[in-house]
Amino acid sequence: MDSEEDEGATEESIPFVILDPGSWTIKMGVVTDEMPTLQIPCLYVEKVFSNSREVKFGHEAVEEYTRAKYETAKLEGEEGDELLNVKMKFCDPRHPLSSNDFTDLFEVYNYLVKRLSIKTDDYNLLVTIPEKVEKLFIINMLNWAFRTHQFASISFIYNSLAASYYYGLNTALVVDLGETASRVSPVAENHGVFLDSAKNCEIGGHLITKYISNFVKVKDRNVDYTLVQNYKELKGYISLDIDRSIKMNSDCNGLLKPYRIPYSNIYIDPKAEMLSHEIYFQPDFLAHLPGYYYKQNVVPLSQLIFECVCSCPMDLRKQLLNNIVLVGGVSDCVNMHERLHKELVNILRLKNYSENTKVHVRNECMSKIAAYLGCRQYGKAIYHNKNKWVTREDYLTTANAKVVHRLLMWANVL
């Protein structure tokens, strides 16, 4: 890396776009903006009129779909077009409600790039990727970046590595509580992510939303999903003592009013607030979820973290337990840090761990966008390191397998 170039570089002279492709919320922006320039749900709504077609993305899509389904007034397009059909599409192939079509996903990406109003061939693209990313996603991403938008170059970084970079931790245990799953990834100095030790669990934001839906009478799963999603983010919390909370709720039976979802006549039982997130610590609650096949091997989040730590080198375990960082959409749920600390301390006691072992679950701000912010800092640091970028010319003249291998190798190196 040319140190003189680094010293002379400013944010204005480093043109690159950051993309954090979450399965529920997509974040995109340019390096000159400290926060994500754009942040929207990964979905769109298509309204078909008798003489025209209209597409809305993100929050506008949710609002349009809700109006079309619940408003009594008849919606019309231009010149009195009659509304024939309204269809919502969840676009990320990882999302359980998606049609597993990359075309839908890149429709949303195209919308975001258009909103940025930039000349893409003057910009590089830095993308955060999950630790167990599908190669099909990478191949489609490269094709979209270089053939559709002609970005100058591209580079990847793993989510957990970007998050630890943002918090200034060389060694950390990154717990990503995402929409489609939960991932526990150990990161160590001079090593990167221990990919073989990383653990996955299918419990995530999607199952929480589905569990909350069990407390209402569901007619249309898509619109109810988006409305319940908002309820989950606003009202959900984690009890520090679930048995005591259930007893208090029973004692107050009839005093707590059900929550009414806006735009609809859907009401949610007050018990959903405290029980929905409990599945992280008592996954056997899922056995009562209609239509869900409960898997006996699903373990609580605290147990998953403990197993991940135990699979790491002995000399790193205490340091990992002392540097647990929560990221992802569910990470800022009320009492999540305190409850996870309590459960982990209890596991260590049962396993006869040394009393000197400290458990520290860091209650950091910006946890929901930590990977994006870390990606922004990382991009400025590596901008002049040509080894970490694949140019458009490299992509067009090199076999796909070699390009993918190179990108994944550098994605795990700070």
Image (cartoon, grey):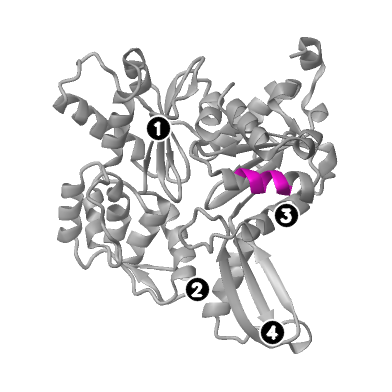
Depth check, front residue: 13 or 413: 413
Dots 1, 4 in contact, CB < 8 A: no
Of the residues shown, which amino acid type is indicated by label 1?
Ala
Badge nearest the viewer, 1 or 2: 1
Q: Which of the two discs, 3 and 1, labels the residue nearer the N terminus?
A: 3
Query: Would you say 232 lies left or right of 390 here?
Result: left
- Within 10 Å of disc 3 (Cα), the crowding (few <14, some 14-19, many 20+) is some
Which quadrant holds the N terminus? top right
Of the residues shown, which amino acid type is indicated by label 3?
Asn
User: Against 100, is 81 above or below?
Assistant: below
Q: CA distance from mark 3 to mark 1?
A: 32 Å
**Residue 76's mark?**
4
- Within 10 Å of disc 2 (Cα), the crowding (few <14, some 14-19, many 20+) is few
Query: Would you say 382 lies left or right of 318 here?
Result: right
Residue shown at 84%/38% (left/top)? 122
Of the residues shown, which amino acid type is indicated by label 4?
Glu
Badge nearest the viewer, 2 or 3: 3
User: Against 218, is 209 above or below?
Assistant: above
User: Against 382, is 333 above or below?
Assistant: below
Q: CA distance from mark 4 to mark 3?
A: 27 Å
For disc 3, the marked residue is 110
Q: CA distance from mark 4 to mark 2?
A: 19 Å
Give the extent of the magenta segment. 138-144
Q: CA distance from mark 1 to mark 4?
A: 51 Å
For disc 1, the marked residue is 198
User: Against 47, is 304 above or below?
Assistant: above
**Residue 263's mark?**
2
Dots 4, 3 in contact, CB < 8 A: no
Expressed as whole percent of the image width and height from the top left, the position of residue 98 reads 52, 62
Q: Look at the image and say whether residue 259 sits in the magenta stretch.
A: no
Q: Which of the two discs, 1 and 2, labels the residue nearer the N terminus?
A: 1
